[in-house]
Amino acid sequence: MRILHVGNVANNGYLNAKFQRREGIEADAICDETHILSLPEWEDADLHGPFEPYPNPDELARAGNWRRPPWILGPADPAARRRFPGQFFLDGLARSYVEPLVRPSIAARVRKDYAPLEPVLGPLRPFDVNRGLLALQRFALLWPEPQRLFGGYDVVEAYATHPILAYLAGAAPFVAFEHGTMRELPFEDSWRGRLLSVAYRLAAKVVITNPDVIGSARRLGLENTIFIPHPVDETKYTPGPSPFRTELGLAGGERLLVSPSSQTWHLKGNDALLRGFAEYLRGGGRAVLVLTDWGPDVERSRALACELGLEERLRWLAPLPKLRLIEAYRAADLVLDQFVLGTFGAIAPEAMACGTAVVMAFDPGVHEWCFPEPPPVIAAREPGEIAAALTRLLGDDKERERLGTASRRWVEEQHGWQLVTDRHRAVYEGALGARQ
């Protein structure tokens, strides 16, 4: 079975391909994201020090003493990446407007496929198809002839908004991988939202990794969804020793809290965390909180921390490469995830796999349809609830140890790489069976 993973937000494409190769599936990956957090080097290279947001992957790999495996497909013309952005855009733009003239069936196909969505999303706009073809043609400047490329595989799995490319290129069958991209994107008034919704409808399967988006799937009338957890490698994320506390200069008995989330208040609730931490300290607690110095609301978080008098109790760090983040998870007394959505991405299961208890906003009802057993996270959303959780857990070593052990077991049984891979294999086999 030959599988092509296209797109790599948060390294999900890379990780799924990596897991599948362990099981004998011939999986390749196109990792065309350019932000450092979506480069395979961020996941597996031994990186240290500050980093540019958009580094040269080759230089990053050398710095981390790591080499990309041969199944990560590079662009046919690496020099094309160095074109000035205007030329890159115009080349794709010219091709995207010629394509519908040469093959008018493309626009007709999209209009027909979109028709069931019109009552929900409104009409397809005249240039929506052209904008989608522009994205496809820009992709083709680095990976020429996408139709032939995709046709060389049994199944194409496309991530984030890349299902638009698989759909327009006529990949059959293709699987769409949702990782937060179904919450809002399908409903935005844009070509991207409308074409992504069409791609979801026409996919052989839509893999949902965020349980809370099931409402969006129902709103779009999707009947082709399946839940598969985010890919997390519990053979790498394990309990163990860590130099992290010593590197921070913490005293032996000082409590350590780690919050790896970006500073994005409307999604992560960083303001609630800061207020809850301040309340915990006012109640006589003592701990150090590690925060990540990135995201759109960094300055707001810094200002609020100053207002609350937290500066001496905080450690601001740049985003940690995953091998360093594992050290932080292992050293932490508690990991603090997000306090808004009621569900989790990768942070919670990564920390739990390392045997560390997690405090976060958690809605059990959202997860009943996809997990037979809820994870043993500590639910908290409001500042007072966060403060109470910190007071209780940081004062009870045995309870934290119990939660850490239960967390590790839950990941192994409900979220492990083998489970993720087996479910993907079943999806591929089903897609191929339906095609025959």
Image: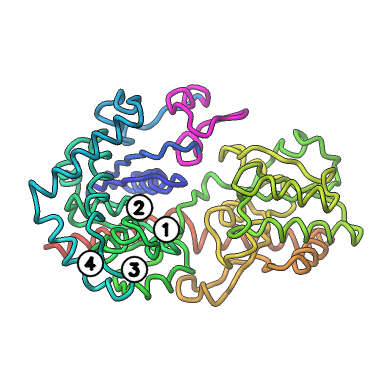
Q: What stretch is highlighted in magenta?
A: 37-64
Q: Residue at x 19, y 49 (%)?
A: 169
Q: Earlier in the sequence, mark 3 or mark 2?
A: 2
Q: Which of marks 2 and 1 is nearer the N terminus?
A: 2
Q: What residue type is labelled 2?
A: Thr
Residue under circle 3?
Answer: 225
Q: Which amino acid does label 3 sit on?
A: Thr
Mark 1 vs mark 4, CA separation in Å: 19 Å
Horizontal side of 165 relative to 8 (left or right) equals left
Mark identifier at residue 114: 4
Residue under circle 2?
Answer: 161
Q: Is residue 378 above or below residue 45?
A: below
Mark identifier at residue 181: 1
Mark 3 vs mark 2, CA separation in Å: 16 Å
Foreground residue among 335 and 178: 178
Residue 148 visible: yes
